[in-house]
Image: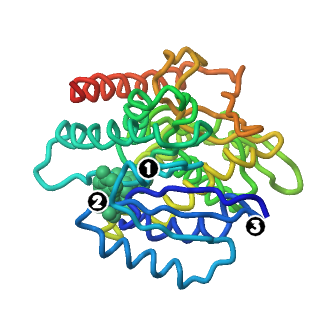
Amino acid sequence: MAAPLRVLVTGAAGQIGYSLVHQIAKGDVFGPDQSLIMVLLDIPPMQAVLEGVAMELDDCALPLLKEVIPCTNEAEAFKDIDAAWLVGAMPRKEGMERKDLLAANVKIFKSQGASLHNAKPTCKVIVVGNPANTNALICSKYAAPHIPARNISAMTRLDHNRALAQVALRTKTQSKDVKNVIIWGNHSATQYPDVRHAKIQIGGEEKAVEAVINDEAYLHGEFISVIQKRGAAIIGKRKLSSAMSAAKASCDHIRDWFRGTKPGEWVSMAVPSDGSYGIPEGVVYSFPVTIENKEWKVVQGLSIDDFSRGKMDATLKELQGERDEALAACQ
Ligand code: NAX
């Protein structure tokens, strides 16, 4: 068996953490032959909860799990890690202004970016904590130079999976039959879920999702808003935010980063723009990407119609506004 990978999950005492650590530890991400050392970080007031999670993880008696390290010291937690799930963030409290939330989170991700100087240079990072794209941008701005910006990403895979699921529900197929949906932009209500290039396996043939659904009003209207508002709809029902599906999506994201995307398929991932599709360089923007040898590449050459361009620009504008506010809060 290969040498163990050292994996960090921040916010491990929280809701997503509780679903996530087990999924990672049982091999869903790095495969059935990869042993793991799992470092679970949370803030000092959560020490006891964190220890409880670590005890349960031990009690799962998982063959791949060599060691579980509950930790409340950030610098120690980042030492020699191969992968990091940055889930821990300040939740929005009643009466809190958006800019106060942003400022609180900017501080966390500035500090965690700096702590990445302890990580391996090949370390791959997914930021889940919101506002995820902007937190990833801040994290990479303060990361040590040995960690390339392209190693720090944010999660829009949950939105991607939600789009697969909505297409499947509408067409009475399964998510596995649908591929190549795209989430463009920010993980927020301005994101643009796009099925213009998506394909579906139906009746023994591969067809264009647009042709099968054949309802532009739905695809330009309800479909987009259902995905954009899915998180809020789940909070409305569960009185808690999406945790199981968020944990699963984050595992899909890192699994594909380490093990590659399937031939002919792409996934959505928020990464620092390389200028593709006219998105200014550096902005952490969700694109369709393919992954090979642990390197992502933005899918090139997709046609963009006027409707899409309008949506892509609107979510970009929001991201640029968030970035400016976040950078001001870093001063
Ligand atoms: P919880 O509030 O249940 O857990 C967050 C945990 O993070 C807590 O245990 C808290 O003590 C810890 N934490 C806070 N500051 C920390 C720090 N500096 N270092 C380490 N740990 C710290 O939230 P949960 O439901 O688990 O959600 C976590 C984050 O994911 C939130 O920001 C949430 O908005 C975000 N989400 C992002 C999604 C995405 O698609 N990108 C979807 C799901 C989720 O809403």
Asked whether 119 or 285 is in front, the reply is 119
Q: Amino acid at mark 2?
A: Ile
Percent from the top left, x then y, of residue 144? 46, 30
Q: In percent of the image, x 38 and y 75: which residue is there?
A: 51
Residue bearing mark 3: 32
Looking at the rendered structure, the secondary structure element under dot 2 is loop
Q: Which mark is residue 303?
A: none
Percent from the top left, x then y, of residue 173? 72, 61
Give the image's coloring scheme. Answer: rainbow
For this orientation, the residue located farthest to the left is 95
- In this picture, residue 276 sits left or right of residue 32: left
Looking at marks 1 and 3 on the same chain, the residue that comes earlier in the sequence is marked by 3
The quarter of the rendered structure image containing the N terminus is: bottom right
Q: Amino acid at mark 3?
A: Pro
**Relative vertical location of residue 317 with respect to residue 198 in this rendering, above or below:** above
Residue bearing mark 1: 86
- In this picture, residue 262 sits left or right of residue 247: right
Residue bearing mark 2: 43
Percent from the top left, x then y, of residue 190? 40, 35
Q: In percent of the image, x 59 and y 53: which residue is there?
A: 161
Point out the quarter of the image occupied by ligand 1. Answer: bottom left
Residue 146 visible? The answer is: yes
